[in-house]
Amino acid sequence: MAQMTIDFSRFFVPPNLKEAKKRGKEAVNVIRDFDIPEDMKDIGRGHTYLIRTYGCQMNVHDSETIAGILERMGYAPTEDEREADIILYNTCAVRENAEDKVFGELGRLKGLKRTKPDLILGVCGCMPQEEAVVNRILQRYPHVDLIFGTHNIHRLPVLLREALYAKEMVVEVWSKEGDIVENLPKVRQDGVRAWVNIMYGCDKFCTYCIVPYTRGKERSRLPQDVLAEVRDLARQGYMEVTLLGQNVNAYGKDFVDLDYDFADLLDDIRKIGIPRVRFTTSHPRDFDDKLIEVLAKGGNLVEHIHLPVQSGNSEILKKMARKYTREQYLELVRKIKEAIPGVALTTDIIVGFPGETEEQFQDTLSLVREVEFDGAYTFVYSPRPGTPAAEMEDNVPLEEKKDRLHRLNALVNEIALKKNEALRGQVVEVLVEGRSKTNPNMLSGRTRTNKLVHFPGGEELVGKLLPVKITEAHAHTLYGEALVASGV
Ligand code: SF4
């Protein structure tokens, strides 16, 4: 491989997983003076951008911010990559196959870049937080113009200026960052539902997970900033907000002079006139009685909790460093179900973690049966370089992992179908999100419990809360009829 001759030192701060793991006690700085430099304010006029987003809701929301910054510079969105002047890949590092897809895309775009040398091709999000990824792009994909990390989004105008004028690959990835940047512009994808970050980063360090390294330390936005954003969304007519954080239950734990936690925040948001409030993702360890008490007040706090369990076996949970046992998780579920009647619980589960025996996997199945989740995201374990679990012997054969996944999915679907069948004939409240992706004659929306419902109806119902009678149930979807005439 040819030696790189470009001097990246001005821009390139190499990401470092060890550095990223250090959690300092420094106070979190809130930066409020974000602005587009004068010379960049109109730079995009007459030009277009395209963002391809991979991974979790956090990334989707980051893409809304990136779009907001680009549009402030005058760029307009496009879906046509041959037309785009900027193509950005906002990437996910949680699974290897998501990374492989991005590398495949970068290779594919080599030809486009050759025919259109002024195209700015960029990679951002979680992948660049891994040193190995940055090195691979530097060595094998020299046609990439811009690489920036999850802590550098607010620097996009400056980095883009370098990429446009210096014509060199611009790389800026900070390993560790304790700051919160407020007042970044956003282009929200949806006029009905909005995502609101309440905190960034994660300090849990589950042994299989790369997120604490790619997203930095836990830092919470100040309550007044979150509440102001939610109030503003309510004023704009949004019907639902989802509060986002890698571990929303740790909200406020990093405040130095303020005794205010996630339960306090929800209790305050409950009083804002926005019809529905969701949150994701919860960590069972930090889910306390005070929070359950607030959720039990209902109102705009919906009856759905995504509560990742990952395994039903306490020994495996210990190896995962999840910091709770099977019994503690089940006790938490019991308390939640008792306090919030009709609550829907969903979860994440990993099968085939290093050393997981058939017996231990059976514990996961029995926990799923006991909790009766309404749905689950299920995954086969695969090691992420740099995480402690990657040092453990990955000794469950792939065929066995796949077989466990298959058996787990069959059980999850059986329970989900049973729960959905129980809704047949009932009238549920649906927030109409838009046209069904598969049938343009149907509308799609969600119940308070986050179940997807399709029903016939006209465009004018989008954004409304409607009573819908359920007529047909599947494991992942419900069908029904709105109890209002279209146009009413
Ligand atoms: S709580 Fe665990 S799984 Fe979730 S982001 Fe943090 S380290 Fe990853």
Image: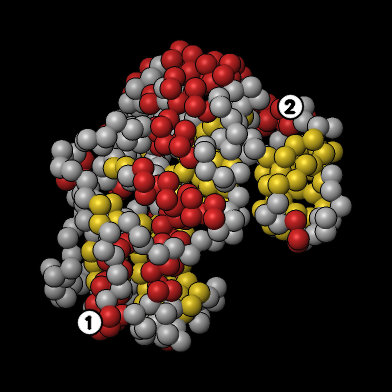
Residue at left 68%, top 40%?
447
The residue sitting at the right extreme is 485
As drawn, is 375 to the left or to the right of 266?
Answer: right
As drawn, is 189 to the left or to the right of 11?
Answer: right
Quarter where residue 80 is shown:
bottom right
For the N terminus, the image quarter is bottom left
User: Which label is found at residue 444?
Assistant: none
Check disc 2 and report the residue beneath it: 418
Up-down relation of residue 145 to residue 478 (above or below): below
Residue in front for this viewpoint, 71 or 273: 273
Residue at left 60%, top 50%?
239
Residue at left 24%, top 67%?
171
Tell me where residue 296 appears, x and y as whole percent: 55, 24
Q: Quadrant of ligand 1?
A: top left
Is the residue under label 2 in contact with that under label 1 (CB below 8 Å)? no
For the C terminus, the image quarter is bottom right
Quarter where residue 155 is shown:
bottom left
In the rendered structure, which amino acid carries the disc numbered 2? Lys
Check disc 1 and report the residue beneath it: 166
Up-down relation of residue 86 to residue 348 (above or below): below
Q: Marks 1 and 2, how far apart in space?
A: 60 Å
Examine the rendering and report whether any part of residue 479 can be seen: yes
Label 1: element kind: helix
- Label 1, residues with CA under 10 Å away: few <14, some 14-19, many ≥20: few
Tell me where residue 52 appears, x and y as whole percent: 47, 64
Residue at left 76%, top 61%?
459
In the rendered structure, which amino acid carries the disc numbered 1? Ala
Tell me where residue 4 appears, x and y as whole percent: 18, 72
Tell me where residue 207 appears, x and y as whole percent: 31, 32
